Image: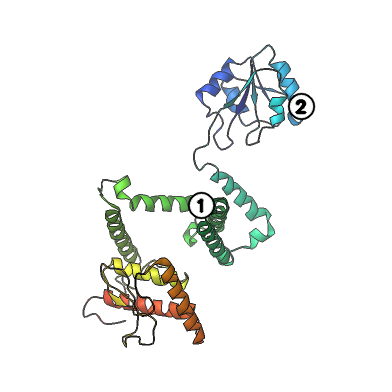
Amino acid sequence: MLTVLLSSPRVAPGLLTWQAWSALRAADRVLTGSGGHPLIPALTSSGVVPAVVDEPLSSDVAALAAFLSSAAADDSVVWLASQGAELDPALFSGLSVPYQVLQGSHDLPGAHLLDLVSIMDTLRVSCPWDREQTHSSLLRYLLEEAYEAAEAIEAGDLAALREEIGDVMFQAFFHARIAAERPLDEGGFTIDDVADTLAAKLIRRHPHVFGSVSVSSAADVNANWEEIKKAERAAKAEAAGSDSAGVTAPSVLDGVPFGQPALSLAAQLQRRAQRAGITVSAVPADGGASRAADATVPAGGAATGTATVTGELTGERAGDALMALVARVREAGLDPELELRAAARRFADSVRQQERPVGSAAE
């Protein structure tokens, strides 16, 4: 009887299943190739001493199949397959004895990310292009990969999404690898620091899952989320010395990335204002007679608009209205992206103005 024992290179040697250890101890012979299998020290220390076969048998599948068939003809034999390598189907088709394939150790979910850490380390050291990259030089790739992932989602192409998410993930590993080259007191961090920070944030923001908070609906979750984020902003401001001169007080808009596309920026600013119960007009005080729409964000409500959209507002009608507005702006010789970005910043200034305590002087 032949047992082909598989094991993961991502699991510490010796951490095998009970079935694997039972097969190893019951075997008449344990065989392995001459490449120096990682399990050999752990097996030897436990009293299971593998025999190493000649290199030609390890590289020649037909010869290996014949050898294993002969060895297992009258004895029970365990063959330690190379870790991480795909078994050649020709090996099994060439066997003339009964056999079983036994998985001796299993990867935990996420264990393959360790491969990416190793590959990233190698690229950073060995690839001339990768060695030269900085956080700044990689910025455009980070954005491009995110947009490509978004396109795959919009197209419903799951195969493409699998690849594009990997590309986005690679950017995270790349930035962490670059940051790891800086001392901790100069802002350096590792991929493990990134994971620890994210894990702590997820646990902190989900007390209804990891704590004792009870919720009955998604609305309760959102309410808790906003309160937690508000407390986080206050804590960050306090840590930065918010009471000292020149430091801006916490705002509901803290953390909004103003470098994002103007339309998504405008939407995020309005959502933040709405959740905080702040009502801000999205047009100038003169009423914006020349504007295509007069939109506001009322407390507890959604943004509303008139002028270019009548009747029920659907996704298609909203998209058409936005396209028409872009055309009008372009016809006027203006840049839609820049104009909306400027309007978004004015909106943000108005939100922060309303957040100031009554009677406080403008800075």
- In the picture, the disc for residue 191 is 1
18 lies above or below 356: above
Residue 263 point in image, percent of width and height: 44, 72
Total tally of numbered discs in the picture: 2
Answer left or right for 179 relative to 87.
left
187 lies above or below 217: below
Quadrant containing the C terminus in the rendered view = bottom left
Residue for point 51% across, 52% down? 191
**In front: label 1 or label 2:** 2
Residue 276 point in image, percent of width and height: 28, 67
Residue sitting farthest toward the front: 311
Asked which quadrant contains residue 45, the reply is top right
Q: Can see residue 130?
A: yes
254 lies above or below 169: below
Answer left or right for 124 relative to 168.
right
Residue 146 point in image, percent of width and height: 52, 61
